[in-house]
Amino acid sequence: MPEPAPGDTREPVSGDTAQGVDRVRAAAAARGLAIEIRERPAANSLPEAAAILGIAPSGIVKTLVVKRSDDTYLFALIPGDRAISWPKLRAVVGVNKLQLPDPARALAATGYERGTIVPLGSTHDWPIYADGAIVGQRIAMGAGAHGYGMFVDADDLIAAYGATVADISQPME
């Protein structure tokens, strides 16, 4: 089993969910990224998940895998209380068409099921576009398996992956 990332003091995860969580831990360790992985009960909504974690909904960052027209992908990191802005993201990426893939394509592109997707440990190192609102924040995000969340300093994540920071979100409608 991979060594925990610096700062991750949790015990190793066991069972079927271990594979995704262990991939996240191994990827963090390989990049020297300090993370904390927490087990958490299932939530029926983002506000409920935020309450379980004791943080504001904006503190949960959604990792959206986005398909380009050439069948390559990117990750968009969006605060939980905001939505992706397609016009802004297309402008930053420099393309005319982007879309969310169906669940099977998202799994094939990342190795993670929807609701667990995170750039760390993805089966492909797709480019990352992080919304500027997460800069300077300690954020929670997926951890590669249902029932787990990861905490990380957004600035460290952005630096470790060379993410592009831009205004790519909008208020929820």
Image (tube, rainbow, N blue to C red):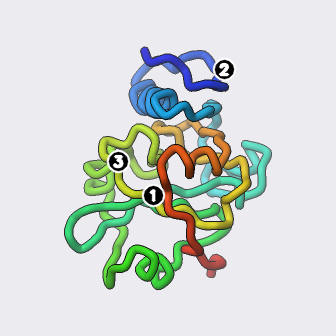
Residue that badge 2 annotates: 9
* Residue at (44% x, 82% y) in the render: 91
Q: Quadrant of the C terminus?
A: bottom right
* Quadrant placement of the N terminus: top left
Residue at the image position 52 percent from the left and 39 percent from the top: 143
Q: According to the image, label 1 marks what residue? A: 128
Disc 2 or disc 1, which is closer to the eye?
Answer: 1
Q: Determine whether 132 is above or below 7 in the image.
A: below
Measuring from the top left, give residue 81's x and y in whole percent. 67, 66
Q: Nearer the viewer, residue 172 or 162?
A: 162
The residue where tag 3 is placed is 125
> Residue, x 49% and y 34% (percent of image)?
31
Q: Secondary structure at mark 1?
A: strand
Residue 62 on image: x %, y %? 55, 57
Q: Amino acid at mark 1?
A: Ile
Badge 3 or badge 2: first in the primary sequence: 2
**Residue type beneath disc 2:** Thr
Q: Of discs 3 and 2, which sits in the foreground?
A: 3
Q: Are marks 3 and 2 in contact (CB under 8 Å)?
A: no
What distance separates the C-alpha of mark 3 from that of mark 1? 9 Å
Q: Amino acid at mark 3?
A: Asp
